[in-house]
Image (tube, grey):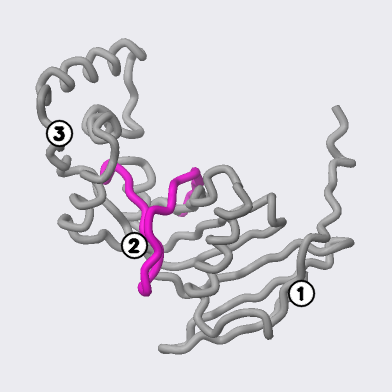
Amino acid sequence: MDISNLREQYKLSTLSKKDVLANPIEQFKIWFQQAIQSESPEPNAMTLATVNADGKPSARIVLLKEVTDLGFIFYTNYESKKAQDMESNQNVATVFNWLELQRQVRIEGVVSKISREQSKKYFHSRPRNSQIGAVVSEQSSPIDSRKTLEDKLNSINLSFAGMENIPLPENWGGYLILAHRIEFWQGRRNRLHDRIVYSQEGKKWKIERLSP
């Protein structure tokens, strides 16, 4: 199969410095809402890139669950591979890719754990089966079979029978990405894409256009 000729002509929209807001988080909210309205599948899916203590990068898809004035919040197991990476190196990068709008958003920043109370509030807003799933999974740890996982699920289901809210596991919670660089990318014809980047300078944001 020859994939060298796979390409798309981007022509849906344009982006310039005069189009964007002074605050990149507010600009992100606008684009995010438009991604939802475009019926993009899982518009809150983002690639999260981390680097471990040995300087080796890895990436995976996680789900954005909240946007605040401070930054971007997602949840995971605190003993997972990505959590281990973030424990040793707080620098992360994320990418949103909204193909329906021919757009990307790239975010670079540092992560920190959010409060346990905030994690508990979100945890108990999840479906009960998702709460149990978080208890069952020792994320990123090897298991010998699918049956082992399902046996553990059945056992924990019995333990929590009749309980609407499952206790928040000690090893599960949220992270806040405090961004210091956010880039908005709009696909354009002939690969001459529009790129507007915000870089934090003290308490202010510097806005620049980048060459494609």
Where's residue 15, x and y in %?
A: 72, 73
Seen from the viewer's position, the closer of residues 156 and 201 is 156
How many C-alpha atoms fall within 10 Å of the one at disc 3: few (<14), some, or many (≥20)?
few
Give the residue number, with chain letter if any, for mark 2: 176
Q: Earlier in the sequence, mark 2 or mark 3?
A: 3
Q: Is residue 50 left or right of residue 188?
A: left
Q: What kind of residue is marked 2?
A: Leu
Q: Residue at x 72, y 79 (%)?
A: 16
Seen from the viewer's position, the closer of residues 20 and 196 is 20
Q: Give the quarter of the image for residue 208.
A: bottom right
Label 1 sits on a secondary structure element that is: loop
Q: What kind of residue is marked 3?
A: Glu
Q: Is residue 68 magenta?
A: yes
Q: Is residue 36 magenta?
A: no
As measured in the structure, the alpha-carbon distance from the residue carrying label 1 to the one carrying label 3 is 53 Å
Label 3 sits on a secondary structure element that is: loop
Q: What kind of residue is marked 1?
A: Ser
Is 144 above or below relative to 65? above
As measured in the structure, the alpha-carbon distance from the residue carrying label 2 to the one carrying label 1 is 30 Å
Q: Quadrant of the C terminus?
A: bottom right
Give the residue number, with chain letter if any, for mark 1: 211
Q: Residue at x 49, y 52 (%)?
A: 49
Farthest-out residue, front: 37
Q: Is residue 111 left or right of residue 103?
A: left
